[in-house]
Amino acid sequence: MATACKRSPGEPHSENIEASRMKRAAAKHLIERYYHQLTEGCGNEACTNEFCASCPTFLRMDNNAAAIKALELYKINAKLCDPHPSKKGTSSAYLENNSKGAHNNSCTDRKMNKKEMQGPRDDFKDVTFLTEEKVYEILELCREKEDYSPLIRVIGRVFSSAEALVQSFRKAKQHTKEELKSLQGKDEDKDEDEKEKAACSSAMEEDVVAPSSSSSSSSSRIGDNTQGDNNLQKLGPDEVSVDIDAVRRVYNRLLSNEKIETAFLNALVYLSPNVECDLTYHNVYSRDPNYLNLFIIVMENGNLHSPEYLEMALPLFCKAMSKLPLAAQAKLVRLWSKYSADQIRRMMETFQQLITYKVISNEFNSRNLVNDDDAIVAASKCLKMVYYANVVGGDVDTNHNEEEDEEPIPESSELTLQELLGEERRNKKGPRVDPLETELGVKTIDCRKPLIPFEEFINEPLNDVLEMDKDYTFFKVETENKFSFMTCPFILNAVTKNLGLYYDNRIRMYSERRITVLYSLVQGQQLNPYLRLKVRRDHIIDDALVRLEMIAMENPADLKKQLYVEFEGEQGVDEGGVSKEFFQLVVEEIFNPDIGMFTYDESTKLFWFNPSSFETEGQFTLIGIVLGLAIYNNCILDVHFPMVVYRKLMGKKGTFRDLADSHPVLYQSLRDLLQYEGSVEDDMMITFQISHTDLFGNPMMHDLKENGDKIPITNENRKNLDFQALEETTEYDGGYTRDSLIIREFWEIVHAFTDEQKRLFLQFTTGTDRAPVGGLGKLKMIIAKNGPDTERLPTSHTCFNVLLLPEYSSKEKLKERLLKAITYAKGFGML
């Protein structure tokens, strides 16, 4: 017996379900049509529907806005256009069914409509990194559709992800001929099945990875870093894997679009905190040096200095960048040092504008220190990298340092002057050296001419609000949580630096005064806490120098005390004014040409040491003490020396180039002599003898080398490195003689050296690349045998001018070993 099926309470009829489904389908199709109309239009160029993209007055909108608008139009039952006959992909049946709310559209029709609505690869969701070609591909598609939202989304996705950005814009590997031949041989060994399998695998990969015409696009896939890196160039220690030229071209194409630029801005805001976290807590750079690519790419954005970035994006990025480890900073500096001056200036101005913007946007004072502003501190640290790039990329001379000539001094029980002055052991090597400077192996003093002037790195608004007393304290204490701008001295002007020097000197004076009082209490002696000088106005030089000489010999630590000057027969307390008058009078007397210690060049307005002076070296030392005391007691003196004097004070040796400042006429004359293309001997008829005048104007002759007045200057000997004279005076030891085969070959090799190689040879054997007074014939070099043939390099004892030379088996090996020794002498080979 048949029984009817009962429906449970609340269960809808199947007819109701079907009706509901039909209504939803109809609504969906209508919304899709509205969306299609808003994004693609009906195709009729004369359309008057204000909600149709084909209407001439219609304002374009992105896909998200179009989707929202389509829903609104559906709710108000807005007008729908009939597709124009020229509009492809539309059928009358489809329109009829949609207008009636029909639900019997085929799946094929629905898929086709969705494809038309989205356009080809509209979202590019499979693009996980960018190449130059991929950017241009997306850009072209966006231009065709007049809709840049897909590119904006890709830019936002890639530039907000550290992983994606690091993999982007990689250089393609350039295979060598041997690698290409090896790859070709491997392909020939494959059988047909393997080739077919490889082809299928490649095709499948192309479906997954974003297609690109660039060969590097598939080599940098996210999540397969090892495989990707294998397909990239093998890089040197200072090379990077990012294609910087490609990045610059991409920025040039995209930054003109305001909406795309906004995508870069928003992405940087999202990216920076994650990068800061990676560098601070996850040590990401040590695991992947390519992480530096991220900073290279972002810094190529030429709009970073624009106002939109200064509020949030750039401060966040600077904070992240300041967290880079020292090795990464140095690598970035070496990369930027190869940039042009204009590119260095652009980066410098980016950080300078951020510092200035933050300074003028806040009220800084003694309670609200500029040192506590994270954005300013981070920007200053980033600016330091640009500063050192400016130094390294300039005209740098890392040689000619005084310490290179110094030999180890045996330990002595006698106290040194520095120990007598009470200097701490940690300060024996001079002032604190910046770690980045040490990592780079270059000093600011090594740079004769930077890419852009040093003055451009000074930030005046920052100097105006800097509380130097607080900053100096932070510098001396070296706390990790307090930043001192004295660690970035390039940003400070002369007034601010002088104030820092004043605080440093005053603290030393107070410290010395306190120590003196303690000694007085313990020993019961009444010691003077000040350095007192009593002088006569008409004998000011004699009185001052005699008194200072006694102090320097008996108790040099007193020179660190605060100076008090008293003029004999005059009443008055020295509150600083008397000392200043004393120094002014001393300087006027010392530099008076009638005294004869210094000469004055009217053309350069500079002083120089008189070579004919009757004063002793000790008296010049006392003059140096006087000038040092003036600086120590904050007295500014009107003294002008050429730059070589200050370079020597900083440990640099004088070179031929320094003549350009100190003796410009002589420099130009010698330069012309060196560059003269004619016959020097026949045309100039000069010898190795010079003339100068003494204090009384009498001419004096001086030979530059023995019998110099009889030796004409020729094209061959005009550079004063006369290696022929060196060969004639060299002595031999350990079994070598002048006639030994290896010695004859040795001199043939040395005489064929270039000028630079000859200087390296002198540096290697004697510790200096300059000839002594009288020429190389006065050098007295010794070449000693150092065993039979070996792979060891030649070595030297620079203090005795001894070259230790193994008896190599061939002339070629001798040349190769000798060149390697003199080229890489620093650090080994020089004893």
Image (cartoon, rainbow, N blue to C red):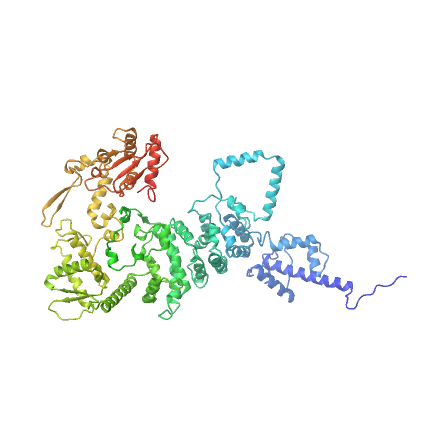
* 671 or 53, nearer to the observer: 671
Give how far across and how far down residue 30 sits, in percent: 66, 61
Up/down of 29 relative to 186, above or below: below
| Residue in the image at 12% along x and 69% along y | 570
Q: Say how many tags the image has.
A: 0
Q: Is residue 345 visible?
A: no
Quadrant of the snapshot with the N terminus: bottom right
Give how far across and how far down residue 579 sits, in percent: 18, 65
Q: Relative to residue 600, is residue 736 drawn left or right?
A: right
Give how far across and how far down residue 14 sits, in percent: 78, 62
Give how far across and how far down residue 489 sits, in percent: 33, 59
| Residue in the image at 67% along x and 55% along y | 110
* 652 or 217, nearer to the observer: 652
Residue 758: which quarter of the image? Answer: top left
* 411 or 241, nearer to the observer: 411
Up/down of 305 relative to 225, above or below: below
Q: Is residue 163 visible?
A: yes
Q: Residue furthest front?
A: 523
Q: Relative to residue 115, is residue 409 drawn left or right?
A: left
Q: Relative to residue 642, is residue 315 drawn left or right?
A: right
